[in-house]
Amino acid sequence: GESVGLHLPTLSVQEGDNSIINCAYSNSASDYFIWYKQESGKGPQFIIDIRSNMDKRQGQRVTVLLNKTVKHLSLQIAATQPGDSAVYFCAESRYNFNKFYFGSGTKLNVKP
Amino acid sequence: GAVVSQHPSWVICKSGTSVKIECRSLDFQATTMFWYRQFPKQSLMLMATSNEGSKATYEQGVEKDKFLINHASLTLSTLTVTSAHPEDSSFYICSASPRVVFNSPLHFGNGTRLTVT
């Protein structure tokens, strides 16, 4: 089926730096996007979401950017901390239905 | 709020036996729950949509007779892996949303690690 993919499987950053995690999706019907954080042995944890009628949304230390023209999504984490180390997934849903498809994930390593 | 709980958190079973995994929404009702499977260092793959009071809908390539889903109440969905084999060993995760409206985040349980020997 259609998939959501990522450019970088692993990202290493220095503590305090900003991180950018990217995601590409393929279905033009995708209309709602979420970034999840998954720590080892746990379920995904919601970080931030964005609807297709927006191109940017900010949260606490995180920003999501959506470019529908090129079907690209990014997550920016400001002042990355060791506690941010995890695997990050983008997920998308379509047709206003709460069924989500996940991208392949990026592992974020934060070096102290 | 919006807590999803899974049980057990891990299980080891012998090849050929069946294993049941429970998913509960603790502080909300969920007419729909979703089951995912995750292999090591891979993404979450949607297996099926569990519908309260009706049959589950399965994603393409997922064997419905292999993975039996029952959603008997608004707070409980179960996934039974029948005649389990070593290749079924995986991390199974359920999710649900407390909101009736669409475009709302799914909340996930902490998963069940299944090992088939």
Image: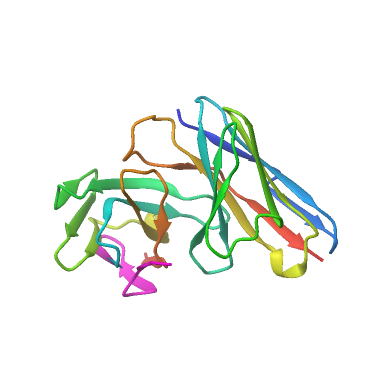
Which part of the image, by quadrant, shows the C terminus of chain B? Answer: bottom right
Residue occupying the point 35% across, 71% down: A11
The residue located at (74%, 61%) in the rendering is: B115
**Residue B25 percent across, percent down from the top left:** 55, 31
Residue B105, compared with residue A77, is above or below; it is: above
Q: In this rendered view, identify the residue nearer to me: B55 or B116.
A: B55
Nearer the observer, B26 or A63: B26
The answer to whether B91 appears left or right of A86 in the picture is: right
Question: Please, which colouring scheme is shown?
Answer: rainbow
Q: Residue furthest front?
A: B54
Q: Tell me the quarter of the picture where residue B86 sits.
A: bottom right
Q: Position of residue B11 (x, y in %)?
A: 76, 52
Residue A11 colored in magenta in the image: yes
Residue B114 in view of the camera = yes
Residues drawn in magenta: A1-23
Lateral position of residue B81 relative to residue B44, left or right:
right
Residue under the image location 31 percent in, 40 percent down: B103
Left or right position of B49 against A14: right
- Whether residue A18 appears in this view of the structure is no
